[in-house]
Image: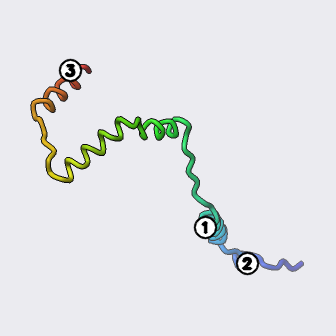
Amino acid sequence: MKINNYGTQGINPYKKQINKMDQTNKAASQGTDKVEISAAAKELQQVSQGSPERTEKVEALKKQVQSGNYEINPQEIAKSILNFYSKK
């Protein structure tokens, strides 16, 4: 009786590992990224656009900052910070 391929002659111990690496590389190269925006995020985008009054105020502040005429009131800032942290 003759048995062919007896022993480790026909076995590659790393073949299984190589196949796994090839499969993961193929899956990674074929996959695409996908972004989904939730309904809450869409609602926040609508709110962030704001009202026309707010848009006008923001534009006026931008112009003041760019021209260098914007003045900071340190007392108001300090009062707002204290109010913010005292509420919590």
Relative horizontal placement of residue 47, taking residue 25 as reference (left or right)? left
Q: Residue at the location (51% across, 36% down)?
A: 43
Q: Earlier in the sequence, mark 2 or mark 1?
A: 2
Tag nearer the camera, 2 or 3: 3
Query: Which residue is label 2 attached to?
Result: 10
Q: Residue at the location (64% across, 67% down)?
A: 26
* CA neighbours of label 1 inside 10 A, class few (<14), some (14 to 19), many (20+): few
Q: Position of residue 30 (x, y in %)?
A: 64, 65
The dot on residue 29 is: 1
Q: Is residue 5 visible?
A: yes
Tag 2 near tag 3, CB within 8 Å: no
Name the foreground residue: 77 vs 67. Answer: 67
Tag nearer the camera, 2 or 1: 1
Mark 2 to mark 3 CA distance (whole Å):
77 Å
SS at mark 3 in the image = helix
SS at mark 2 in the image = loop
- Colouring scheme, one of rainbow, by chain, secondary structure, one colour: rainbow
Q: Position of residue 34 (x, y in %)?
A: 58, 54
SS at mark 1 in the image = helix
Query: Which residue is label 3 attached to?
Result: 86
Tag 2 near tag 1, CB within 8 Å: no
Q: Is residue 17 visible?
A: no
Q: Position of residue 71 (x, y in %)?
A: 13, 42
* CA neighbours of label 2 inside 10 A, class few (<14), some (14 to 19), many (20+): few
Relative horizontal placement of residue 3, taking residue 7 as reference (left or right)? right
Q: Quadrant of residue 25?
A: bottom right
Q: Amino acid at mark 1?
A: Ser
Relative horizontal placement of residue 22, taking residue 47 as reference (left or right)? right
Q: Residue furthest right?
A: 1
Q: Amino acid at mark 2?
A: Gly
